[in-house]
Image (cartoon, rainbow, N blue to C red):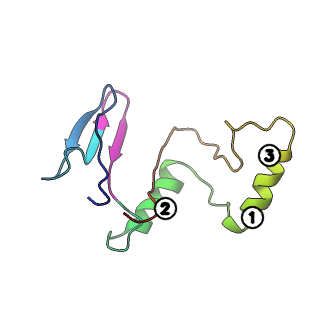
Amino acid sequence: MSHGDRVEQLPPGFEATASTSTVPVVAAEDGERSLFGIQFHPEVTHTDSGSKMLRNFLYDACGAAGEWRMASYADEATAAIEAPGFSARSPAGSIQRSRPAWCSVPWGSA
């Protein structure tokens, strides 16, 4: 693992399912709710097939359409904020999906 990332405490119902000699929780699961988590850095060049893993997560697991482009973000975000009924709880470009999913990708350097 890198960057000093660490899970300090698992949420209720989760148990650690993988670790390293220096990181006590690398993977965890809540089998009752079919929730799984793994800590790694798919965005770095030395992670084999990292881009493929991210694509699979976004498009297969989350059901994202892949239609959003950074080039149009400023215009879309501005229009959404100016639209009647805008709420910070429903951000511009939110993904409509049938299953909850979460992915955190750290950006920057340690």
Which one is closest to the eye, mark 1 or mark 2? 1
Callout 3 crowding tier (Cα within 10 Å): few <14, some 14–19, many ≥20: some
Which one is closest to the eye, mark 3 or mark 1? 3
Q: Nearer the viewer, residue 49 or 80?
A: 80
In the picture, the disc for residue 31 is none
Identify the residue under disc 2: 55
Q: Which residues are magenta?
A: 29-40
SS for tag 3?
A: helix
Callout 2 crowding tier (Cα within 10 Å): few <14, some 14–19, many ≥20: some
Residue 48 position, x and y percent, is 32, 70
- Say which quarter of the image contains residue 37: top left
Residue furthest to the front in view is: 110
Mark 1 to mark 2: distance in Å? 20 Å
Identify the residue under disc 3: 81
Callout 1 crowding tier (Cα within 10 Å): few <14, some 14–19, many ≥20: few
| Circles 3 and 1 in contact, beta carbons < 8 Å | no
Amino acid type, callout 1: Ser
| Circles 1 and 2 in contact, beta carbons < 8 Å | no
Residue 76 position, x and y percent, is 78, 56
- Determine whether, in the image, residue 85 is placed left or right of residue 71: right
The earlier-in-sequence mark between 3 and 1 is 1
Q: Is residue 14 magenta?
A: no
Identify the residue under disc 1: 72
Which one is closest to the eye, mark 2 or mark 3? 3
- Determine whether, in the image, residue 21 is placed left or right of residue 84: left
How many numbered discs sit on the rendered protein?
3
Q: Is residue 43 above or below residue 19?
A: below
Residue 58 position, x and y percent, is 51, 55
Which quadrant, please, contains the N terminus?
bottom left
SS for tag 2?
A: helix
Residue furthest to the left in view is: 21
Identify the residue at image location x=38%, y=63%: 42
